[in-house]
Amino acid sequence: MGIKNVYGIIQARVGSKRLPGKVLLKLGDKTVLEILLIRLKASKTLSGVILATTVNPRDDVLVEIAKKYGVFVYRGAEFDVLDRFYKAAQKYNVDVIVRITADNPLTDVQLMDKQVRILLEKNYDYVAPKNLILGLGSETVSFTALQIAWKNATKQYQREHVTPYIYENPDQFKIYYYEVPEKLRRNGIRLTIDTPEDYKLFMEIYRRLGDLTKVTI
């Protein structure tokens, strides 16, 4: 298997349409992005973390947060997120990418580590959870597969969402979806922050549970 450079790459920008500045919203004394960065430190498989943001000056604030937490930064295209991910991985010599979105502060780190191990042990191109609560998941992909997607994806949604070209072409890639524990199979639950209603829910979760950097679902 050999030693692999495994990096979490977080896509983040301030200019969200439905909830502008959502990754900078506070839950307690920390922003949504800070909570995610702190939680990722518990990973046992990541070599490091890269914040993949845009060249737009309004995203300078995200870069400052990343530097505060010792996270690498790549700045690239605002809407071609696949290009942003590919060039971030290329810049930092990444072999295996874990795609993480900054509006999911409760990303499950234990599941993330599990899927990294599965990908490495079985030599998969792409590993992701099946039927997981929205907002807890991440995707793990080999650099080779990401590079093929970067070269061949032509549709707008394939560029905006990074991995569709890969999972839409199972004949080209070795893909695996793993089952999550039953308690995490709740299709009707949203634990992502994409709308004002989502943020209100997280405020209530914070009120009841306190420090979200330590919360497990």
Image (tube, grey):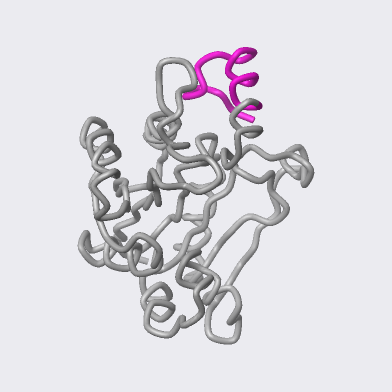
Residue 65 position (above or below residue 138): above
* Quadrant in the picture for residue 145: bottom left
| Left or right: residue 64 compared with residue 113 | left
Residue 192, percent from left and from top: 59, 40
Residue 45, percent from left and from top: 39, 47
Q: Choose between 120 and 83: the one closer to the eye.
A: 83
Quadrant in which the C terminus is drawn: top right
Q: Choose between 66 and 2: the one closer to the eye.
A: 66
Q: Residue at x 52, y 57 (%)?
A: 139
Residue 172 magenta = no
Residue 209 magenta = yes
Quadrant in which the N terminus is drawn: bottom left
* Quadrant in the picture for residue 159: bottom left
Circle count = 0
Residue 158, percent from left and from top: 51, 73
Find the magenta span and give its range.
Answer: 201-217
| Left or right: residue 179 compared with residue 125 | right
| Left or right: residue 38 compared with residue 190 | left
* Quadrant in the picture for residue 37: top left
Q: Residue at x 63, y 34 (%)?
A: 198
Residue 115 position (above or below residue 111): below
Q: Residue at x 24, y 55 (%)?
A: 55
Residue 38, percent from left and from top: 38, 30
